[in-house]
Image: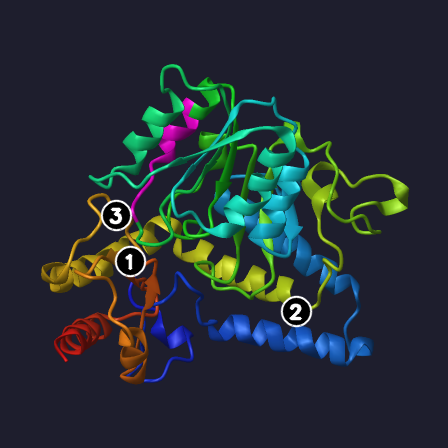
Amino acid sequence: MLASQRPLFEIPPGIAYLDAAAWSPLPRAVSAAGVEGIAAKARPWDFPRSGNEDWLARARAAAARLIGAAPQDIAIQGSVAQGMATAARNLTLAAGQRVLRMADEFPSLCLAFERLAEEQGLVVEVVPRPADGDWTTALLAAIGRPGAAPLALALLTPLHWSDGARVDLDLLAPAVRAAGAVLVVDATQAAGVLPVDVARWQPDFLAFPTYKWVLGPYSLAFLYVAPHRQAGRPLEEHMGNRPGGGFAPGALRYDRGERADPVAPRMAATGLELVLGWGTPAVAARLAHLTALLAGGLADLGVLPAQRSPHVLGLRLPGGVPAGLIERLAGQGVFVSDRLGVLRISPHVWIEETDIATAIDRIKSALRD
C-alpha cells in the first residue's frame, strides 16, 4: 500500500488536514514550481517565454493521461464553471426534452445548463436523494422511466460532492448513450483518485480542476471535449486558440485566454505528475484505508452513505452539524467541512494513521461538549 506522503508537504505536526475535497495544500515541489513561475514573470529576461508553452503542453498531456484521453482532446480552462459554460454554449437540444441531474448538485454543474434549459425550452428533472442512498439505481430509473419526455442531456458526477456517496458511471454512461442523450461529467471530486476513463464513459464533455485531488493551483481546470464536439464556438477568441485567424485543432480551440500563464501550468503539471507517479489505484487504496479507519471510529455517531467513495466520508449527525463545530475542530488542528449539513471528512496522501486517531478523538470530544 502507498505510504503516507506527508514529508512532501509543508504540514506541521499536530495538523490533521482532512479537507482535501475543499482544496488541497500544495506539495513542496508544486510550491517550488510556482515560485519558479513567479520568477519567470518577475525576471522575464532570464526565462524564455517559449518555456511557458512547454509547461502548458506538459500540463495538458498529464491531464489527458490521467483520464485516458489524447492531449488534443483537452482544453485549458480557468475553472470547471468555465468548462460547463463552454459545453452549454455548444449544445442545441430539442424543446420539451429532459435535462437530468441529482438533487443538491454543485452550482458549477447546474447553472449554465439551467440557463440553457430556459433558452431552449427543456425540462430540468432533479432526481431526489434516494432514501436508501443508492443514487445509481435512482438515476437509472429516471433515465428509462416509462412515459417520460426524451432524455436530451445528463449531468453526472462519479460521487455526490456533499457526502461522497458513490455514483456508478460505468452503469449510467451506457444508459445515457442508449437513450441518445448528451453526457456531461463533472469529475471535480474524482480525478486523481477514482478511475476516470473517457474511453469507457464516452462523455461529450468532462471537466476537472487542479486545486483539489491533483494537488495543483487554483484557477486552472481541464475540459475534455469528445472529437465530435470539437467544431464549436469557444467562449473566448485569441491568438492562442485562433493562431493565424483560424481555429486551433481539436479541443485547443476552447482554450481560455492568457493560457500561457507562467505560474499555474508549471504547478498543475508538477502536481499531476506526482499523482500519476503514484497511480490512481494506489492513491485510492491508501485513502480507502484511511476512510475505513474513520468510518470505524465515527459510525456510532451518525449515518454514513451505504455506497461510499474511497476518499470522501460524509457523516450525517442527528440534527445536522452543530453550530461552531467546524471552527472548534479547526482550533484543535482538525480540519473538516460542513456540506449541506453533512460532516464531510476527506483525507489525502499527506494524512497518517495518527492523524486519523487524533481526528476521531477530537470529533467525539467536540460533539460531547
Element type at mark 1: helix
Question: Where residue 169 sits: x, y (%)?
Answer: 38, 34
> Between residues 340 and 345, which one lies in front from this camera angle?
340
- Write down the region rendered in magenta: 165-175
| Residue contact at pointers 2 and 1, CB within 8 angstroms | no
The C terminus: image quadrant = bottom left
Q: Is residue 256 magenta?
A: no
> Can residue 107 be seen from the camera position used here?
yes
Above or below, 83 relative to 44: above
Q: Which mark is residue 308?
A: 3
Q: Residue 67 carries which label?
A: none
Q: Distance between the residues labelled 2 and 1?
A: 29 Å
Q: 67 left or right of 221? A: left
Above or below, 20 relative to 176: below
The N terminus: image quadrant = bottom left
| Circle 2: residue type | Val
Which one is closest to the eye, mark 3 or mark 1? 3
Element type at mark 2: loop
Pick out the residue farthest to the right: 244
Mark 2 and mark 1 lie on one chain; the one further toward the N terminus is 2
Residue identifier under label 2: 263
| Circle 3: residue type | Arg
Which one is closest to the eye, mark 3 or mark 2? 3
* Residue 47 location, quadrant: bottom right
